[in-house]
Image (spheres, rainbow, N blue to C red):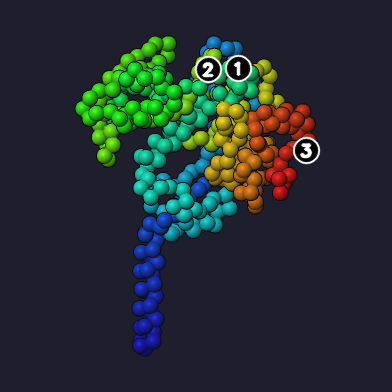
Amino acid sequence: MSQRTRAGLLALCLLAVLWGTAAFVPLPYVTYYPGPTVDILGEDDGGETVRVTGHRAYHDEGELRMTTVYVSTPQEDVTLPELLRAYFDPDAAVWPRSSVYAPDETDESSDRLSEVAMVSSQDTAVAAALTELGEEVDPIVEVLDVTPGLPADGELEVRDVLLEVDGTAVDDAQDVVDAVDGARAGEPITFLVRRGDEEVSVDLVPEEVDGDLRVGITPGPGYDFPFRVSVDIADNIGGPSAGLMMSMAIYDTLTPGSLTGGAHVAGTGTITPAGDVGPIGGIQQKIAAARDEGAELFLVPADNCNSIGGVDTGSMRLARATTLHGTLETLAEWVADPDTDLPTCEDTA
């Protein structure tokens, strides 16, 4: 065997070792794939997903599907083969980790943020739907999350309405933060909350966490509704991006007749109490998920219009969503005539 041949074989062996090593080295990227869709007008565990107490509910034909995305978690090791698989999949996407997660974000902290966002989004969706129906909605401050292992664990509950802290009325979430920050170590703080139809008083002794006093709750905006509406979404689905679809499903449940005319409609978008639709992440993957589920119409937040180029929609139509009110009008026009002109992303180009 010549020296050149031996050198070539050695180079090939080294290259194989390098590729083999590279295949297992985590890279600072995040992958996105289409996730499952959920019909919010359907049933979950034998009961309706949208549940109403104190008002007549109407359950009709058709589907309003929220869409989700499979995203690699903050601590998940994304290797070169996985990146290449996502890169060459027309329905997937690859993003730098720094553009998706904070440097110190963990799987646990990411899940908690997502859960808090879902609680807030559900309440806001109810507020948007009821406001559209002309119902009175009053702002409150409520518990959005309780951290396990801290003083509030087992004492306060998610959706407890925060009325007073140490005798001072709570007007916004910052009032609660200021009260805890101003507490004395080792001394209790009294929280007066409304839980259901009862007022409950709870004494909590803050604990020091990373140099700050904490009781272990996340206070945030909520709403007093004239009757009870809840959306029963699986615990493993979080984030705020289902706001538009939840508000439409709630509106449909509270009004006679089918909002979709019996058709299958999907979409995405955050929502504000006033009904403004906001952008979300993973728009192309959500469109692909809806297409694969056989949706006939997909609602795209207006602010995501510049991110849908090249996505395969199949036979599914896309319509631009800017407000809840406008989207309801769009849907009514489409139900009356599926071939009608709809507001599209091209209209904003």
Q: What x and y, as percent, mark residue 69?
A: 51, 42
Q: Quadrant of the N terminus?
A: bottom left
- Mark 2 is surrounded, within 10 Å at the Cα level, by few (under 14), some (14 to 19) or many (20 or more) other residues, namely some
First of labels 1, 3 by sequence position: 1
Q: Amino acid at mark 2?
A: Phe
Q: Which residue is mark 3?
A: 341
Q: Residue at x 74, y 32 (%)?
A: 334
Asked whether 186 or 161 is in front, the reply is 186
Q: Which residue is mark 2?
A: 225
- Circles 1 and 2, Cβ within 8 Å, touching? The answer is yes
Label 2: state its secondary structure: loop
Query: Rounded to the nearest whole Å, what is the CA distance between mark 1 and mark 2?
Result: 8 Å
Q: Which residue is mark 1?
A: 135
Q: What x and y, as percent, mark residue 349?
A: 71, 49
Q: Amino acid at mark 1?
A: Glu
Asked whether 43 or 219 is in front, the reply is 219
Single out the mark in the foreground, 1 or 3: 1
First of labels 2, 3 by sequence position: 2
Q: Residue at x 39, y 75 (%)?
A: 12
Name which quarter of the figure residue 250 lies in. Answer: top right
Q: What x and y, as percent, mark residue 15?
A: 39, 72
* Residue at far bottom of view: 2
Q: Amino acid at mark 3?
A: Asp
Name which quarter of the figure residue 107 lies in. Answer: top left
Q: Is residue 88 visible?
A: yes
Single out the mark in the foreground, 2 or 3: 2
Q: Residue at x 54, y 36 (%)?
A: 241
- Mark 1 is surrounded, within 10 Å at the Cα level, by few (under 14), some (14 to 19) or many (20 or more) other residues, namely some
Query: Rounded to the nearest whole Å, what is the CA distance between mark 1 and mark 3?
Result: 31 Å
Asked whether 12 or 31 is in front, the reply is 31
In this picture, is 55 found above or below 119? above
